Image (spheres, rainbow, N blue to C red):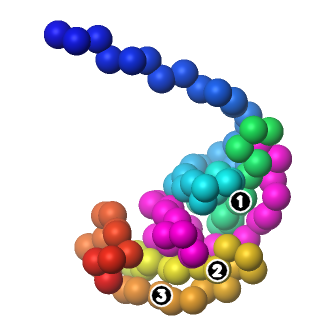
Amino acid sequence: MPTRPRLRPLHSFESPGAHLCGLAWDGTHLWYSDGDTHSLYQLDARTGRILTTLPCPEVRTGLSYDGQHLWQVAGHPKRIRVIEPHDGQVKNDYADKQICAVRPEDL
């Protein structure tokens, strides 16, 4: 059986919260969503420094980035929020009781 290459972290740092709900990469920064703080954080990928904090009430699981917007599962029942990363404005909100994962092209 061939040996798989081992993944090693390049950098590590403390997370901004205690309840990780999602991670996304926007090509430059790491985005972290947290269920305890109900926030989305834009992080410097090398240092972990918080660059932006956006409120996201009832953040749940699953964070993604489509090249323009953040997509976060939030709410009770679960909804998909399309969020402007520069100011946190909700651009769209999709209801779906069966959400597990989402690809923007499927909506």
In the rendered structure, does residue 67 fall within the stretch colored magenta?
yes
**Residue drawn 51% across and 80% down?**
81
Q: Which residues are magenta?
A: 48-73
CA distance for labels 2 and 1: 13 Å
Figure check: 105 above or below 91: above
Secondary structure type for disc 2: loop
In the rendered structure, does residue 57 fall within the stretch colored magenta?
yes
**1 or 3: tag closer to the N-terminus:** 1
CA distance for labels 1 and 3: 20 Å
Label 3 environment density (alpha carbons within 10 Å; few <14, some 14–19, many ≥20) = some
Residue 68 at x, y percent in the picture: 57, 75
Image quadrant occupied by the N terminus: top left
**3 or 2: tag closer to the N-terminus:** 2
The residue labelled by disc 2 is: 84
Front-most of 20 and 104? Answer: 104
Left or right: residue 63 versus residue 26 is left
Residue 53 at x, y percent in the picture: 77, 65
**Residue drawn 52% across and 80% down?**
82
The residue labelled by disc 1 is: 41
Secondary structure type for disc 1: strand
